[in-house]
Amino acid sequence: MTAADLPAINASLNATAGALLILGMIFIKADRKQAHGYTMGAAFVVSSIFLVCYLLHKYLVAQEHAADPTRALHTPFGGEGIWRTVYYVMLISHIILAICVPPLAIITMRHALAGRYEKHRALSKITLPIWLYVSVTGVLVYFFLYRWFPAAAASVP
């Protein structure tokens, strides 16, 4: 596996997590609590695998670009004009909210596992939309960077 393989895998993991989150929401609305619990647990596992793969990607890119270590932290964006603004607004919001997801998800799940359902319900109204936004924008970041506006197509000085 190379660094080039991981962005598509990461996007797939984000899409899977997003689908599981929506399915989990459907299950709880249908009062299928056990299915909801399993589905949300699966979403957490998939998101955790994503995080490991994301960090692995950063590590592998840093190894490939040892002469320029900043390359591992920032993948160049090839879009211009309004697309550049749209991308960076989305990326910044994605990064800030992605930092919040692991602790929010862990605390939300701990409330459920401990039987503190009122606290679980209250916090899930914050956690779910943030987690879903991060999953969806993670897929969009992939498409912006690697499919729609790859840096190789841009004229970089």
Image (cartoon, rainbow, N blue to C red):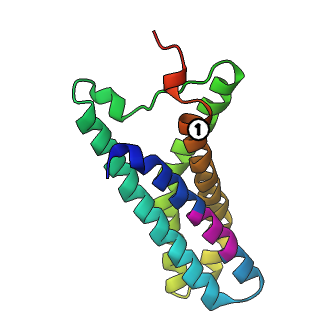
In this view, the residue in front, 125 or 44, is 44
Residue 24, compared with residue 61, is above or below; it is: below
Residue 4's spot in the image, x, y percent?
A: 39, 43
Which residue extends farthest right?
30
Magenta stretch contains residue 17: yes
Q: Residue at x 58, y 79 (%)?
A: 39
Left or right, 8 with reference to 60: right
Residue 60's spot in the image, x, y percent?
A: 28, 43
Can see residue 79? Answer: yes
Residue 134, compared with residue 68, is above or below; it is: below
Residue 131's spot in the image, x, y percent?
A: 59, 59
Left or right, 40 with reference to 60: right
Residue 38, compared with residue 81, is above or below; it is: below
Q: Secondary structure at mark 1?
A: helix
Residue 29's spot in the image, x, y percent?
A: 76, 80
In this view, the residue in front, 103 or 42, is 42
Q: Which residues are magenta?
A: 16-23
Q: Residue at x 63, y 82 (%)?
A: 36
Q: Residue at x 42, y 31 (%)?
A: 74
Left or right, 41 with reference to 136: left
Left or right, 64 with reference to 47: left
Q: Residue at x 68, y 66 (%)?
A: 125
Residue 64, picture quadrant: top left
Can see residue 92? Answer: no
Magenta stretch contains residue 79: no
Residue 115, picture quadrant: bottom right
Which residue extends farthest top?
157
Given the image, on which type of amino acid does mark 1 rest? Answer: Arg
Badge 1 is on which residue? Answer: 147
